[in-house]
Amino acid sequence: MVIFLCAALFPGGEEKGEALLIKGAKIYTMGPKGVLLGASLLIEGGKIKKIIEGLDWPQAQVVDYSGKCIIPGLVDAHTYISGYYRLLENSQVVTSDLVALAAFDPLSPEVDEALAAGITTANLCPRNENLVGGITSILKLSKDPKGVFFLKKEGFLKISFAKDVERDDRAPTSLMGAKEMLDESLKNAGNQGDREEIFQEQGILKLAKGELQPLIAASNYEEINTALKWLSDWKKKGVIVGGEEVYRFIEELNKKEISILLSPFLFAFPDRIFEKASSLLKLGIKIAFVSDMPEGEASGLRTSALLLFHQEMPQEEALKTITLYPAQILGVESVVGSLEEGKDADFVVFSGE
């Protein structure tokens, strides 16, 4: 059983400025303190003020979770939550001016579904059907629509070399054609000069100037090879999402410090995928599992970590693939991803291990 908790959800004390003491649980901090037994979190103003390796603190409202486990709120680094049909602009193949935050609906039942699964942070992404889908937005979820806020209104520029991009009725009609079209878009963006204010493809321009990193959908060998070649040609770092055959590029991924977001459709081959995911982590390549909601299920994050654990990966390391590592990949690890002093007080409480 999972319960999502946030300081702002507790009645009484926190609203009056009083401290809250979450005590008695086994805490997986995902930070330098590791796993703590019978420790307590002291919360003030929605932040973790102190992690106490004891059970008491004067003048604090106490919430006792003895016998339970606490981990950081889950971070979903690639999702279409609440805005699936609005996250695709059909009129053009390059729509880099679409910003995902405009598609987010805080009243969607999918938000409640994500929270019930322990997801507290989400990277809302344009879909894969366009070569350049638009700009992702990284947000904190909340049961209260007024409590939703954006950690980054502009996270990454979503690029896709997935098969969904290729169409018979319009360009690009091939993977090579997609790369050539993307190259041309970057060249045009770099030539705009003082005309920035009238340049409609602001996302492409920001990518060209290094203000946004690319998040590239690529799954099979040819797609990933194209993505890596494009990154090399333009001397850019980026993140690959999908990644079914990334294990065939281990040396290059390690050398270029490219992170991988593994999508849930890979679960059709769980043994192979999670064996390879385990190998990637052991070689120092940063990976994270994602939900792709609503194409995938919110519970897929926890299922992924569990399957990775079954591949003889230490429990804490497996949990980092759905907490700390996605936060680091998204660049929001100073706020979420681990339970440390000064970070946001959002976490998941499990009724057992």
Image (cartoon, helix red, strand yellow):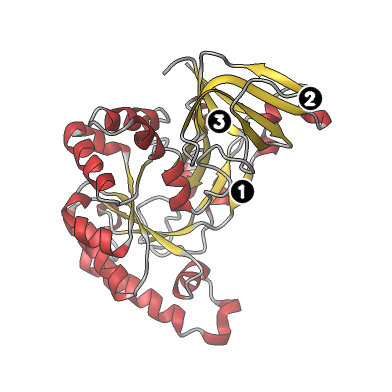
**Which numbered mark, 1 or 2, is in the foreground of this view?**
2
Question: What separation in Å lies between label 1 and label 3 (alpha carbons)?
Answer: 18 Å
Question: What separation in Å lies between label 2 and label 3 (alpha carbons)?
Answer: 18 Å
Q: Which mark is residue 347?
A: 3
Q: Secondary structure at mark 1?
A: strand
Q: Earlier in the sequence, mark 1 or mark 2?
A: 2
Reading the image, the residue beneath label 2 is: 13
Q: Which mark is residue 300?
A: none
Q: Name the amino acid type tagged 3.
A: Phe
Taking the spot 34% from the left edge, 50% from the top edge, the residue there is: 286
Question: What separation in Å lies between label 1 and label 2 (alpha carbons)?
Answer: 26 Å
The image quadrant of residue 319 is top left
Reading the image, the residue beneath label 1 is: 150
**Which numbered mark, 1 or 3, is in the foreground of this view?**
3
User: Residue 220, image x and y in percent?
Assistant: 20, 51
Q: Does residue 332 lie above or below 231 as drawn?
A: above
Q: Does residue 149 lie above or below 24 as drawn?
A: below
